[in-house]
Image (cartoon, rainbow, N blue to C red):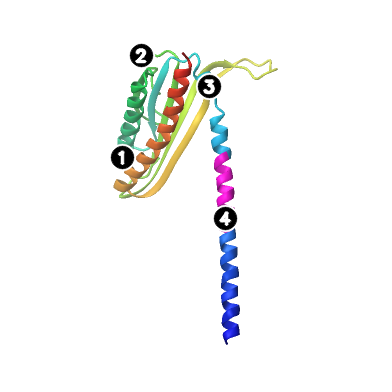
Amino acid sequence: LAGTGDRGRGGAHLAGGLVGMRAALAAIFAFAALMVATSSRAETDWTRQLAGLDGVAIACVSSTGETYAERICDKLSENARKALEIAGVPVAVAGYFREGGPSPDKPEGIAKPLQITIFLRGTPGGNAAILVRGRASIAYGAAVEAGSDEAGRSGDLVIWEESSVGSGPVKQLEAAIANAMTDKLAGLIAYVVKGWAGKG
């Protein structure tokens, strides 16, 4: 019986070792993936990307009529605006718009902005699912693919994108999603401020 017990403990140690090894490998792979993502984003030359731009325009576009979407929009927009103003970056907040409705107008005094758009989706009810996606983009007028004879096409060049998603009681979820996106947008704002300073 003692021998059986010893083998049982040995098996437990072996199983524990395998679990530990798997956890360690998962952590290594996750860290490697994080490093790749961080490295990729760090390679963006923000001073070059912001060349020719004269400010930042912030707008929210929502697919839901729930009031929590407007509150999240207000918090994220205001935090970003304050941080940019403190750094001396020209900024304007276009406001809150419903998806499928009129598009945000270009802000007065900023002819060619970096556009920060906050997209909001969510469900109604006391328990909701909320998705918030932030995107930084630059409008271009007539880009042509190298070597192509086709006419130029207008569009948006997306240079940054992050999102936060969750579900649960609306009151707690609203705060959690807003805080998570505030942190992610703070990272974007730091890039913009550094790149703006490099413009000279």
Callout 3 secondary element:
strand
Please name the residue that numbered disc 1 is placed on. 68
Please name the residue that numbered disc 3 is placed on. 155
Callout 4 touching callout 1 (CB < 8 Å): no
As measured in the structure, the alpha-carbon distance from the residue carrying label 4 to the one carrying label 2 is 54 Å
The answer to whether residue 102 is visible is no
Residue 170 in the figure: left or right of residue 188? left
Residue that appears at 30% across and 36% down: 71
| Residue stretch rendered in magenta on the structure | 22-35
Coordinates of residue 77 in the picture (x, y in percent): 34, 29
Q: Nearer the viewer, mark 2 or mark 3?
A: 2
As measured in the structure, the alpha-carbon distance from the residue carrying label 1 to the one carrying label 3 is 30 Å
Residue 33 in the figure: left or right of residue 200? right
Dominant secondary structure (helix, strand or loop) of the stretch shown in magenta: helix
Q: Nearer the viewer, mark 4 or mark 2?
A: 4
Please name the residue that numbered disc 4 is placed on. 24
Residue that appears at 59% across and 59% down: 21
As measured in the structure, the alpha-carbon distance from the residue carrying label 2 to the one carrying label 3 is 21 Å
Callout 1 secondary element:
helix
